[in-house]
């Protein structure tokens, strides 16, 4: 037994060291996480900042040209050198507000700005999707789009109708699109699919309460029987369609 005692001692010391580190070392993921404020808190902070606010649109310039918050600056930076030049034109002491479609690109930009010394950085929770869906104003070069009456007319069918609200700029929408297309082809005899470009139909997204992209809405006889936001798995959509057809 004495022959193995040093080995067991070493194992115990290693175990104790691991436990101690786990208890005292900061959780890198928790430390890096920055909780989003509420939508209401974002509005309050933005209003309070007034003309002092720096509002950055983290989307592509062409997205910015279509719709953006009043007073926002297009801030889509392709490389580190351009990023350094772009932030040099900003004031680190001023409150900075950031948004993208949801919180993908804006989240990354927020982290980058904080890493460069910006202390007061606030993301728009839910991004421009929620802002528009909540009926908040934007500067726009795009018309109101499809009217609610025309939309309702398009739902008339003896089949189930699946409406896909998305955007060609939305990464999650691009992941969902082939799933919807596959189901559309496989269930063509019993399903009608309608694709809506949300940012070209702002009034409609607001009236239907679409505050996140992508969003699927399933109708049976002009009545909503199911609504889901996010990249919904094919199996879940197929299950919902099967139940709706009963």
Image: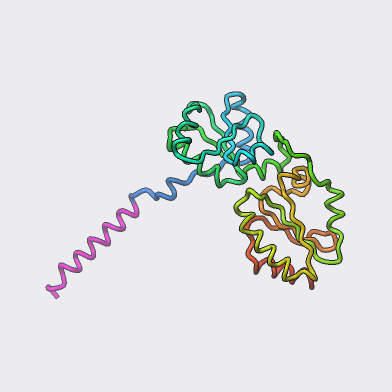
Residue 61 at x, y percent in the picture: 61, 38
Residue pictured at 83% horizontal, 46% vertical: 147
Q: Nearer the viewer, residue 52 or 158?
A: 158
In this rendering, position of residue 22 left or right of residue 222? left
175 relative to 136, above or below: below
Name the magenta segment's main secondary structure: helix
154 relative to 140, above or below: below
Q: Please provide the residue range marked out in magenta.
A: 1-23
In this rendering, position of residue 21 left or right of residue 29? left
Name the image quarter holding the C terminus: bottom right
Residue 85 at x, y percent in the picture: 47, 31
In this rendering, position of residue 220 left or right of residue 10? right
244 relative to 37, above or below: below
Task: Give the total of numbered labels.
Answer: 0
Q: Residue furthest bottom?
A: 1
What is the quadrant of residue 14 in the picture?
A: bottom left
What is the quadrant of residue 6 in the picture?
A: bottom left
Residue 126 at x, y percent in the picture: 62, 45
Q: Is residue 97 magenta?
A: no
Q: Is residue 16 magenta?
A: yes
Residue 191 at x, y percent in the picture: 78, 66
Q: Residue furthest top?
A: 51
What is the quadrant of residue 8 in the picture?
A: bottom left
Q: Nearer the viewer, residue 143 or 15?
A: 143
Residue pictured at 57% horizontal, 34% vertical: 56
């Amino acid at each position: 037994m004495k022959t193995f005692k040093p080995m067991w001692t070493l194992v115990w010391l290693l175990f104790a060291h691991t436990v101690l580190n786990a208890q005292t070392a900061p959780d890198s993921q928790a430390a890096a996480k920055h909780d989003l404020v509420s939508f209401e808190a974002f509005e309050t902070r933005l209003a309070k900042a007034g003309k002092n606010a720096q509002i950055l649109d983290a989307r592509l310039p062409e997205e910015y040209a279509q719709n953006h918050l009043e007073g926002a600056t297009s801030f889509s930076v392709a490389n580190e050198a351009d990023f350094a030049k772009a932030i040099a034109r900003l004031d680190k002491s001023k409150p900075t507000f950031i948004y993208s479609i949801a919180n993908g690109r804006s989240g990354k930009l927020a982290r980058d700005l904080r890493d460069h010394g910006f202390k007061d950085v606030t993301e728009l929770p839910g991004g421009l999707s929620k802002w528009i869906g909540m009926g908040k104003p934007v500067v726009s070069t795009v018309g109101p789009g499809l009217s609610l009456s025309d939309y309702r007319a398009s739902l008339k069918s003896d089949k189930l109708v699946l409406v896909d609200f998305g955007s060609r700029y939305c990464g999650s929408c691009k992941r969902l699109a082939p799933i919807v297309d596959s189901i559309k082809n496989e269930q063509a005899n019993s399903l009608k699919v309608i694709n809506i470009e949300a940012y070209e139909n702002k009034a409609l997204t607001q009236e239907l309460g679409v505050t996140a992209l992508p969003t699927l809405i399933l109708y049976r006889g002009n009545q909503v029987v199911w609504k889901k936001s996010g990249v919904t798995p094919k199996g879940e959509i197929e299950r919902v369609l099967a139940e709706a057809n009963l």
